[in-house]
Amino acid sequence: MLPTGFEGALQTVWDRHLSAKPVLLILVGSDMSVMEALQSYGRPFFGRAAKMTVRPLHLGDVQAMTGLDAADAVDALLITGGFPEIVQSWRPGVGRADFLREAVANPLSPLLVAGELSLLGEFPEASHSRAVLEAVGSGERTFSTIAAQAGGTGALPSGTLSPLLNTLQAKRVLAADLPLSAKADTKNKRYRIADPYLRFWLAFLQRGIPLIERGRGDLALERIERSWTTWRGRAVEPLIRESLLRLLPDERWPETEAVGGWWNRQNNPEIDLVGTDLPQALNSVRAGETPTPVAGAVHFVGSIKWLESQPFGRREYDALARDVLAVPGAGPDTPLVAVSRSGVVGSLPLAAHWGPEDLVRAWQ
């Protein structure tokens, strides 16, 4: 939040004293919605500044800095979010478990401190916004479950929660996903923490800080290890979809320009990957809601299996072949694909499959 009168005062100083001098004025801020508002119509700096977004390190950068193999580099990105200070604290060649063990032994480690500092400035602990973030960070994905979790003794009213969700999306702290297929679906929106590091911090480190501060980082680490595989299986999905979008279109799918997922209200089935042409965005009737993606054609349907020692096998293939028929626009002849951390059983008739090395290659 900018101080009242800051923009006007800065404009006055610039116009009267600095504009005629060899001075480059750079304004830096972490809240993208606030920084973008500085250049909106009617504001003092409208039309007078260039915008540059400084993004976190990507998967290829993280692998280069940590010296890890492709699969472990994916883990490192999910934990650090690509924030340079945190990635720099990851000593080259150190595995995930050892890095976390070192981090939770120090209450002032960048991995622990960065999350709290980034939240305190914008979302005080007692605010509804913070409660909503913590609900989503704990794994709640639907409007009703977020309302129940964030409301404490009673669910947050729709009139309170809807504006909060819209604001958090505008700040790019939350992301909202809709099922991708050849049929519009506005009722099955799923929310997630947009930043991988903040998602990890809210899921594990926030609750572990009191333990770490009294010297029991070992207990905090045990909690992470118990839930790591399950948490990672969900957290890796957006990264995989984004990576595939960097690999596609290709010779096999020259018109594939969108990769998402598909699910129904019961999440049964829930399809990890749906590749389509560029969807038409049907704007929702209600102002502020996420446009509904509707594809003209479904090019492939796929599944993700991200386990250390189990490849994508016959059971996963049979489930995918059965569930593909539920996706609007897909049929018995729709190509099936897979993404697996540990490879694919060789005899499966998949149209394509990708592994950790392919995901890293997408960013190099």
Image (tube, rainbow, N blue to C red):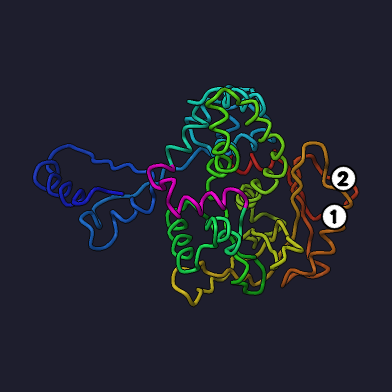
Give the left or right position of residue 193, taking residue 31 as reference: right
Quadrant including the C terminus:
top right
Q: Which secondary structure dominates the residues rendered in magenta? A: helix
Please say if 337 is above or below 345: below
Of 158 and 91, which appears nearest the observer? Answer: 158
Residue 123 lies in the magenta stretch: yes
Q: Residue at x 37, y 46 (%)?
A: 52
Residue 21, how many percent across, how many down?
13, 38
Marker disc for residue 176? none
Query: Was residue 156 drawn as part of the magenta stretch in this picture?
Result: no
Classify residue 221 as left or right of residue 82: right
Mark 1 touching mark 2, by CB under 8 A? yes
Q: Is residue 107 above or below residue 52?
A: above
Quarter holding residue 13: top left
Please state if 115 lies on the left or on the right of 254 as rendered.
left
- Circle 2 sits on which residue? 345
Badge 1: residue crowd in 10 Å (few <14, some 14–19, many ≥20): many
Q: How many marks?
A: 2
Counting from the top left corner in percent of width and height, residue 205 is at 56, 36
Furthest toward the front, the residue is 153
Given the image, on which type of amino acid does mark 2 rest? Val
Secondary structure found at label 1: helix
Report the disc number at residue 317. Answer: 1
In-front residue for pair 302/354: 302
- Determine crowd level at label 2: few under 14, some 14-19, many 20+ residues with C-alpha closer than 10 A: few
Q: Residue at x 69, y 42 (%)?
A: 358
Q: Residue at image x 87%, y 58%?
A: 318
Which stretch is magenta?
A: 119-139
Amino acid beneath label 1: Tyr
Residue drawn at x 64%, y 22% is 93
